[in-house]
Every structure is written in C-alpha cells, then in structure tokens.
Amino acid sequence: MPQEREQGHTVSVDHDRKRRLRRDLLEVRSALPPDVRASTGEGLARHILELAELAPTGSPHTVAAYVSIGGEPSTRALLDRLRAAGVRVLLPVLLADNDLDWAVYEGAERLVRAGRGLLEPAGPRLGPEAVTEADVVLLPGLAVDRTGLRLGRGGGSYDRVLARLERAGARASLVVLLYDAEVLAEVPAEPHDRHVHAAVTPSGVHRFAAPEARTEG
C-alpha cells in the first residue's frame, strides 16, 4: 500500500484520503439547516419501514439503531416508528474503551444524556454481544460507494461491532443511513473497512452485493 510521511509518522495514502474526505463531508453536513435534517429523518423512517428484512413474519424483529447527533441524518422519527411497528429496537451505550454495549429503546422520554453529546437508553444494559441478535443493524457513516464500502467517522466503535457480528456468524443486514449526496462512486479503503448490504437515504434504498460474497485483494 502506498505510504507517505505526515508530521513524523508514516500513514497510508488511503488513510490520508479518508481523513480529507471525512473533513469535507462533515463541513457539508454542518452547513445543512435544521429543516433539511428534519425532512431527511422523515424520509429515512419511511424507507426503513419498507425494508424487506422487516416484513411481518409472525415474530418480532430486532433492529440495532442509534440516536443521531449533530449533522447526522436524523434518526428520531425512525426510532419511534420502528417501536410503534412492534420492532425491538436496541441502542448503543458507549463504554470507556470505545466499545458499545446495548439497551432497549423505550421511547424518547427514556433517553439520558451521556458523554460526547450522546443520548443513551436508561434501561438495563444487555452486553456488547446483544447486537448479534439483530435482524438489521443501522450504522452511522459519512459515505458509501457503489460497491457498498462504508466510510465511518474513524472512531472505531462500529468497526468492533462489525467484527463482533462477523465472529458470531450473524446474518444481520448492515444498513448505513446517509444523505443522498453521500452515495459516492468510490471511497478510499483500508484493510479493516467493511462493506454493507444497503444504504438508506431520503430518496430510497440503495442495495449492494452481499459483503460475504466479496473476495479480498
């Protein structure tokens, strides 16, 4: 992999490209007015409920989701609509080592403020492995490309989640929530990056080849 020097350290060219792309995407998000974010949330909620993975089966589905913050596409509407539809919704609880525990979403009134501006469920913690019970895992991100490669924020929490799902042999559908303009032709990749099955944006559902069907290299 090509390397370059940055402030006395060796970093991959793709790592540097990701850092610059993240910066640019975050700048665009920060300029979005609140009404655009709110309308985006309504579109996401509508299309999430249209996912074939959440079609009625006679037994409740489980969805691992998250509470949006800052410039992220709003998840407030979709959390309530999933719950109203009888879906068991799990939300993350950030641990001291940046890993994620999980708890059931019991409504907006049962969210409590946590560090880093996060909102977390007040209920009992179920353990990091609880995510492996999910039929669908909704992922935050900054972009996805036409192959389904997701660009995350770089914090590493969801890299651990995806690795945990892989180790458990879980068959959850991985879905990243984005704005329409964040579905790109290509995003830079590093060896630890993972593909997703779909992206949901205000305009609809974008499907990709199953991650497990891909070959490395």
Image (cartoon, rainbow, N blue to C red):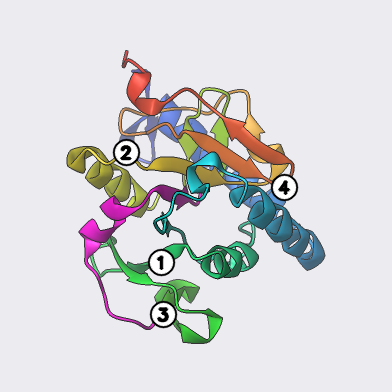
Q: What kind of residue is marked 3?
A: Ala
| Distance CA(mark 2)–CA(mark 3) | 30 Å
Q: Earlier in the sequence, mark 1 or mark 2?
A: 1
Query: Circle 2 is placed at which residue position?
Result: 171
Q: Amino acid at mark 4?
A: Pro
Asked which secondary structure carries label 2, the reply is: loop
Dot 1 corresponds to which residue? 91
Q: Residue furthest front?
A: 58
Q: Residue at x 72, y 53 (%)?
A: 43
Work out how far the residue at label 3 is from the one at label 1, CA to CA, in angstroms. Answer: 13 Å
- Label 1 secondary element: strand
Q: Amino acid at mark 1?
A: Leu
What span is colored magenta in the figure? 122-141
Residue annotated with mark 3: 114
Q: Disc 4 marks which residue?
A: 202
Q: Are marks 4 and 3 in contact (CB under 8 Å)?
A: no
Graded by Cα atoms within 10 Å as few (under 14), some (14 to 19) or many (20 or more), the crowding at tag 4 reads some
